[in-house]
Amino acid sequence: MPPIAPELSAPETALDLSLVRKYAAAGPRYTSYPPATRFTFGPGEIGLEEAFAEDNASPDRPLSLYVHLPFCESRCWYCGCTTVITRDHGRANPYLDYVEKELALLAPRLDPRRPVTQLHFGGGTPTFLSPAQLRRLGAMLHDRFRFASDAEISVEIDPRRLSLAHIEALRDIGATRASLGVQDTNPEVQLAIHRHQPHALNEQAFAWLRGAGFTSINVDLIYGLPLQTTATIRRTIADVLGLGPDRLSVFSYAHVPWMKPAQKIFDQRGQLPDAEAKLAMFAVAHAELRAAGYVDIGLDHFARPDDELAKARAAGTLQRNFQGYSTRAGASLHGLGMSSISSTPDVYYQNFKTLAEYRAALDAGRLPVERGLRLDPEDKRRRTIIMRVMCERRLDYAALSRAFGFDFSERYAAEIASLDDLEADGIVRRDAHGLEVTSRGTPLLRIVAMRFDPANYAGAKRHSQAV
């Protein structure tokens, strides 16, 4: 791919690590508000059937679909995803049988006139499925739903579990976007995290995807892993930039051994970098990607300036959902498979996280929903505020006053006043009309958003550090 023209990306203030040190704290990533940690009620209590009716009241509202494919052949010790570890590929067809049962229950509850504008296959390892199974899954979905002509169909890919036949099957079902799990290209780091992945596999995956006409490829990287240093991060960034990705997600490793027991091995070995080393890695990744011309979308996301994500960021049309940042607005998200999360304008709901519970619900003829949350009017208002911070990096008080039907700056005076320290440090700018997160404050978007969240996350162990 051609090099990025640096003049196309807007200049940004250099990363200020002293501010990151001062303000970084544990908190939600705000892929939703309220966050999923607040889901506590069952399907009857959240009024799930009423939520479908409310959602269908707007037949022009598009649909976004997510399918969770949980199988992995081996466990990566850093991983926080909901997975099923097995080398028995015979388990995939029975799982698809249950997804088909779930589809038979879900699809009739949704207005068939509503177009699907997004479909994402996540996991786990979607390419654990064979090419024939991927085609079967695609056919199941296309038979039940009407897809828009420009529907965005994307898939997460493990380059270690990939063949050209997989890519051909994905193209046959309409996929044009892929996200590759790379994490780190250093062999010693890979050994420490139990993920051996020669860079040649990444190069091969890119060549196959580009050859098949995939229009957007994202790469996932993680900093803060065992044995990583600023030198290994710089080398990994250089390796990955040589592939010419359209987007990168550079995540901070979330060490939560009380939730993911496999991570305890890192504590036993004493190989994790300390907080200062981790911050230095973040600084290196940020500087290298900005120097290469990538636009800082927010949080951990970077994109080429000609990518849809960067264009949406510039135009103020960026969206955020459970898959992260998105360019498609207004869609209701409906998830399929164990642990998947769905959202309508009024309700969030999540499927059972274990395979046994997921199957038992479907065998009983019920949607496999374990828990969720019905949003009250104040939840919806704060969702709007927090998503505008996360996506637009600004709040227009007059526009919010019109949307809410009351004086925004008066109702939320305490929250606005709580930003005094952030303004003094140059993280936000404020006047009587609104506020804006500065480029200096972009790495702390979550901290700004948290000032409008009434929950107290101090000492909580259910969220990762902001950086």
Image (tube, rainbow, N blue to C red):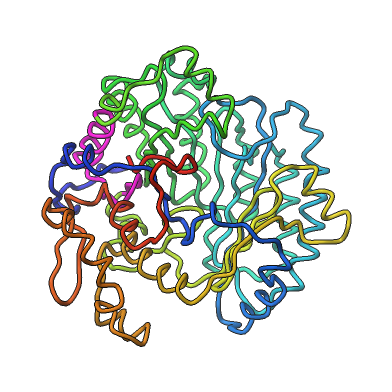
Q: Residue at x 48, y 19 (%)?
A: 266
Q: Position of residue 178 (x, y in %)?
A: 50, 46
Choose between 51 and 408: the one closer to the eye.
Answer: 408
Q: Position of residue 299 (x, y in %)?
A: 33, 48
Q: Position of residue 368 (x, y in %)?
A: 76, 56
- The answer to whether 446 appears left or right of 175 in the picture is left
Q: Residue at x 50, y 50 (%)?
A: 177
Q: Residue at x 48, y 61 (%)?
A: 34
| Residue 308 sits in quarter | bottom left
- The answer to whether 224 appears left or right of 414 in the picture is right
| Residue 88 sits in quarter | top right
Vertical comparison of 233 with 109: above or below: above
Vertical comparison of 398 with 379: above or below: below
Vertical comparison of 399 with 298: above or below: below
Examine the structure image and report whether residue 350 is included in the region drawn in magenta.
no
- State the quadrant of the N terminus: top left
Q: Residue at x 72, y 58 (%)?
A: 369
Q: Position of residue 284 (x, y in %)?
A: 23, 31
Choose between 445 and 129: the one closer to the eye.
Answer: 445
Q: Which residues are magenta?
A: 280-303
- State the quadrant of the C terminus: top left
| Residue 310 sits in quarter | bottom left
Choose between 323 and 211: the one closer to the eye.
Answer: 323
* Residue found at the very far right of the displayed protein: 364
Q: How many marks?
A: 0
Vertical comparison of 335 with 183: above or below: below
Examine the structure image and report whether residue 300 is included in the region drawn in magenta.
yes
